[in-house]
Amino acid sequence: MVAHVLLDLVCHLESHTATAVLLRVNVTAEHEKTLGLWDQSSLFVFQQLSVTATASALSIQSVSRRPLHDLCLWLGGYRTLFSEPCARCGTILAIDPVGSLLPPIYRAIASDAKGY
């Protein structure tokens, strides 16, 4: 999968300490280069992935000492998004409530399990 991932960070610099707070994550497909920086993807799978990534980023930074590193590792789990089956049901695509076929977009933060 080739995608663009944009991270919205707010950085705070104090005397000898720098901190960054991640506000949101936007994921778009490679072919959506004409979109503005924060325009939402036209593809439902990437819209859902953006929402999931933002929620996971907020969760990761609340418990991690290296949140950006851990978020990048978590995002790396999506390299097999369209080729690896769901850990729970064994399928590569499933029908979502809207009727679209989606790959397993949910990734556990501390595990390699893939699911819908």
Image (cartoon, helix red, strand yellow):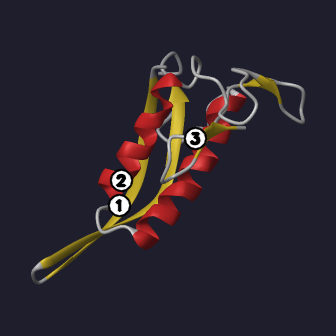
Percent x, y of residue 7: 41, 49
Q: x and y percent of residue 44 in the render?
A: 71, 31
Q: Residue at image x 37%, y 59%?
A: 9
Give the residue displayed 59% in from the left and 19% down from the top.
82
Three-letter amino acid code at the position of disc 2: Asp
The residue mark sitting in front, 3 or 2, is: 3
Mark 3 to mark 2: distance in Å?
Answer: 16 Å
Q: Is residue 100 above or below residue 17?
A: above
Horizontal side, residue 97 vs residue 77: left or right: right
Q: Which mark is residue 70?
A: 2
> Is residue 113 positioned above or below 102 on the image?
below
Element at label 3? loop
Q: Toward which corner of the image does residue 5 lie, by quadrant?
A: top left
Amino acid at the residue labelled 1: Pro
Q: Residue 21 location, x and y as percent?
A: 38, 67
Can see residue 35?
Answer: no
Find residue 45 and report its image quarter: top right
Q: Residues within 10 Å of mark 3 (few under 14, many from 20)?
A: some
Distance from the alpha carbon under mark 1 to that under mark 2: 5 Å
Find out whether the residues at labels 1 and 2 contact each other: C-beta distance under 8 Å. yes
Nearest the eye: 86 or 44:
86
Q: Is residue 38 above or below residue 67?
A: above
Q: Which residue is mark 3?
A: 113
* N-term mark: 1 or 3: 1
Q: Which mark identifies residue 67?
A: 1
Which badge, 3 or 2, is on the more N-terminal residue? 2
| Label 1 element class | helix
Marks 1 & 3, CB-CB < 8 Å contact: no
User: Helix, strand or loop at disc 2?
Assistant: helix
**Horizontal relation, residue 18 to residue 54: left or right:** left
For the point 65% across and 34% down, the residue is 87
Q: Position of residue 110 (x, y in %)?
A: 48, 53
